[in-house]
Image (cartoon, grey):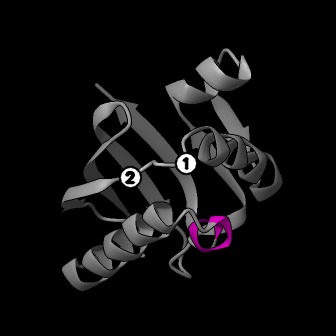
């Protein structure tokens, strides 16, 4: 799927809104059933050395822990960057300035996401 500005802006807006509402179902709506998430926080929180989780069930459990541990979690949108079949959301979150890379399938769903933090 080729990413254009309209799609990137819409996705970023909905992704930030979903996180700020703490609505786990809305957050998960952006992803395929078998998507993979890689994040240093997975290593910190879950003790998984490679920092990877695969599938909505595993990731939803991880995110549910995070949302309950950080009830005031809030993301401040800064910018979105467009790639060919991916985009990057740059935002300010609990670890300061952060960015996430999202890789999309042909249906506009994320099949892989990689988080980066300061």
Instruction: Please give the name of the residue rendered at 29% of the width and 73% of the height, measured from the top-left corner.
Output: 8
Q: Is residue 5 left or right of residue 113?
A: left
The residue lying toward the viewer, choosing from 19 and 110, is 19
Q: Position of residue 49 (x, y in %)?
A: 67, 14
Quadrant location, the N terminus: bottom left
| Label 2 packing within 10 angstroms: few (<14), some (14-19), many (20+) | some
Can residue 2 be seen?
no
Residue 64 covered by magenta stretch: no
Instruction: Decide: is 48 above or below 69.
Output: above
User: Which quarter of the figure has residue 53?
Assistant: top right
Quickly name the residue at label 2: 74
Work out how far the residue at label 1 is from the one at label 2, CA to CA, in angstroms: 9 Å
Q: Is residue 99 left or right of residue 67?
A: left
The residue lying toward the viewer, choosing from 37 and 106, is 37
Can residue 107 be seen?
yes
Q: Position of residue 44 (x, y in %)?
A: 60, 18
Quickly name the residue at label 1: 71
Residue range of the region highlighted in magenta in the rendering? 24-28
Instruction: Please give the name of the residue rendered at 38% of the width and 47% of the height, measured from the top-left corner.
Output: 100
């Amino acid at each position: 799927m080729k990413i254009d500005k309209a799609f990137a802006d819409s996705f970023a807006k909905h992704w930030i809104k979903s996180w700020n509402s703490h609505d786990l179902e809305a957050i998960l709506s952006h992803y395929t059933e078998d998507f993979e998430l890689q994040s240093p926080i997975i290593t910190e929180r879950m003790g998984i050395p490679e920092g990877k989780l695969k599938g909505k069930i595993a990731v939803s459990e991880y995110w549910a822990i995070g949302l309950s541990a950080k009830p005031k979690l809030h993301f401040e949108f800064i910018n979105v960057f467009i790639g060919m079949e991916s985009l990057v959301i740059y935002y300010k979150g609990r670890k300061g300035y952060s960015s996430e890379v999202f890789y999309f399938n042909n249906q506009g769903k994320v099949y892989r996401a990689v988080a980066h933090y300061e």
